[in-house]
Amino acid sequence: MRTVVIDFSRFGNAKEAHAYLKDTLSFPEYYGANLDALHDVLTEIAEDTEILTAASGAEFAEGFLKVLRDASNENRHLKVRRKPRNRRDGRRHG
């Protein structure tokens, strides 16, 4: 299974997120870099793929997250879930 992590806080805008997804998931050259095109290519994925999403306050991230969830409901090869947060070691030092 291919696993991809998407941390939307790494991107300054939606254009950067689309470019990352296109490169990381090997989208075709004709990928339109918009949410409708994203949905189309995600529902065509034929290799088992897991996308882990990291929480983000970026305004554009909500649209991406909705498309990711919708596409995963339509494509049995695509799983989308939240990336587990890193937990700090609870031991006290000193």
Image (cartoon, rainbow, N blue to C red):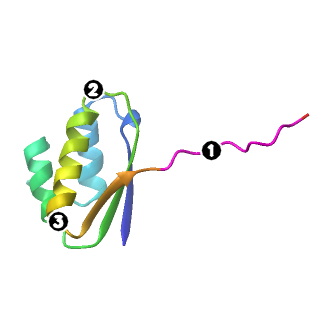
Q: Are marks 2 and 3 in contact (CB under 8 Å)?
A: no
Amino acid type of the residue that numbered disc 2 sits on in the rendered structure: Glu
Residue type at numbered disc 3: Asn
**Residue 48 falls left or right of residue 93:** left
Amino acid type for the residue under numbered disc 1: Arg
**Element type at mark 1:** loop
Q: Residues within 10 Å of mark 2 (few under 14, many from 20)?
A: few
Q: Which mark is residue 75?
A: 3
**Residue at position x 27%, y 59% in the image:** 25
Q: Which residues are magenta?
A: 84-93
Q: CA distance from mark 2 to mark 1?
A: 25 Å
Could you say which is closer to the camera, residue 5 or residue 32? 5
- Residue located at (17% from left, 52% from top): 70
Q: Give the numbered dot on residue 45.
A: none
Marks 3/1: CA–CA distance: 31 Å
Instruction: Choose between 55 and 31: the one closer to the eye.
Output: 55
What main secondary structure does the magenta stretch of the protein show?
Answer: loop
Q: Is residue 39 magenta?
A: no
How many residues crowd mark 1 within 10 Å: few (<14), some (14–19), many (20+)? few
- The Cα atoms of the two marked residues, 2 and 3, are separated by 26 Å
From the top left corner, tell me how far across and down residue 48 is, in percent: 29, 72
Which numbered disc flags the more N-terminal residue, 2 or 3?
Answer: 2
Q: Quadrant of the N terminus?
A: bottom left
Quadrant of the rendering where the C terminus is positioned: top right
Kind of element beneath mark 2: loop
> Residue 59: which disc?
2
- Residue 58 image position (x, y, % from top left): 33, 28
Judged by depth in the image, the label closer to the viewer, 2 or 3, is: 3
Q: Earlier in the sequence, mark 2 or mark 1?
A: 2
Q: Which x, y percent locates residue 39?
A: 12, 52
